[in-house]
Amino acid sequence: MSATLYGVGVGPGDPELLTLKALKTIQAAPVIAYVSPEGGDSLARTIVKEHLDGEKIEIALPVPMCADPSHGQEVYDRYAPEIAAHLDKGRHVAVLCEGDPLFYGSFMYLLERLGGAHPVEVIAGVSSLGAVAAAAAMPLVSRNDVLVVAPATLPEPELEARLRSSDAAAVMKVGRHLDKVRRVLGRLSMSETRYVERAGMDGERMLALSDAADGAKGKAPYFSMVLAHKGKAPAFDVPEGAAIACLGPAGLELAERLKKVLPDSRIHYLNGEDVGARLRALFQKGTPIVGVCAAGVLIRSLAPLLKDKRVEPPVIAVAVDGAYAVPLLGGHGGANRLAQAITALTGGGAAVTTAGDAMFGLALDDPPKGWRAANPAAAKKIIVALLSKKPVGLKVEAGNAPWLTDSGAPFTEK
């Protein structure tokens, strides 16, 4: 009868985070196997080395650390028969895995090759995700929050799309993608961010995301992660008294949900009435308009009234399923924030098109609550300069303006 193949999680790096069950399994197994970089030491073996007696059979799997996954698959193909031979001879094999064996773990590749023919037991370990949250003293999620775990290696548009609907995010494998991660989180208004490198290992560091990016010149170690939360402020830092215009029964349910998160808002059910006249009357009163309808309805209705963007109220079109909120007018007069508050509720996307927001997650003439623009007229010139990659100096006290320092804007220090 075949012996058992164990996938043993040995934790993120600190030997004291090795579980008792993992230690007992390793000590009892006559054979251990582990991934090691070509020409380097295995981190998994290093974590447990003080518990090895020198009498075990050791199988090192030299996996190339490169972007092409086929090289690693060739290594698993080559060594799986050797491990299987030990199992067939009645020798238990403990495969040492950094973190948890089945959380981005290499054990899954041996499981695919050997699991059907041999008994398997997986010993859970402290994952890198848990270690990073502990190092940052930052809760991952609470209550009904949705957490998305994504590798930073994804193309920038895909990474942003994956994180857009989440309440919290863990971005792994940061490495040379640090600047990309900062840009994406800035555009998504992730207000709480922590950067942690080498969690649970020697040299562990926890920094503000802006400090990590500045100090690393756009690069970070492979063993680094960014945790982020959207926070709850955007749902309240919005213009009050919005008119939620609903044109039919299909949008009424969403309108009722929006009313609960938009302060002092009121539903205007316009089905069967002169829609254009009602919308124009609200607009002329300076009432923010959230239309649960097609953007074209709002555009055709309000076009005759458009004269001065400095005094026009915000206007947003929201798809009846909540998938998109499109700020049509008054982006920097509260429409962008309204759209973001709406999509924080619906899990959809805010189609923000104002240049500074789209590129850097930044609106100098519409700062967050508690801030004001001393010279709003200069905001456009500054954003144009940033978009043109001209030097724009920024001087703030450390940690005093994260909405500026953590944005994706390429400010200089002079």
Image (spheres, rainbow, N blue to C red):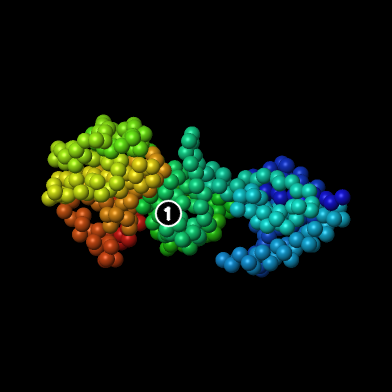
In depth, the one of 150 and 265 nearer the eye is: 265
Identify the residue at horizontal 35%, vertical 56% (top origin).
408
Q: Is residue 204 visible?
A: yes
Task: Give above or below for 116 relative to 342.
Answer: below
Identify the residue at horizontal 62%, vertical 45% (top origin).
126
Q: Position of residue 270 (x, y in %)?
A: 24, 35
Check disc 1: other Cα within 10 Å, few if <14, some if 14-19, many if 20+: some
Instruction: Look at the numbered disc 1 and give the secondary structure of its residue.
Output: helix
Q: Is residue 366 left or right of residue 169?
A: left
- Residue corresponding to mark 1: 160
Q: Is residue 257 left or right of residue 228?
A: left
In depth, the one of 155 and 363 nearer the eye is: 155
| Quadrant containing the C terminus in the rendered view | bottom left
Q: Position of residue 91 (x, y in %)?
A: 84, 53
Residue occupying the far front of the picture: 272
Identify the residue at horizontal 73%, vertical 42% (top origin).
21
Identify the residue at horizontal 73%, vertical 62% (top origin).
60
Q: Position of residue 148 (x, y in %)?
A: 50, 47
Total numbered labels placed on residues in the image: 1
**Type of amino acid under label 1:** Glu
Rendered image quadrant of residue 230: top left
Q: Position of residue 388 (x, y in %)?
A: 27, 66
Q: Is residue 113 left or right of residue 200?
A: right
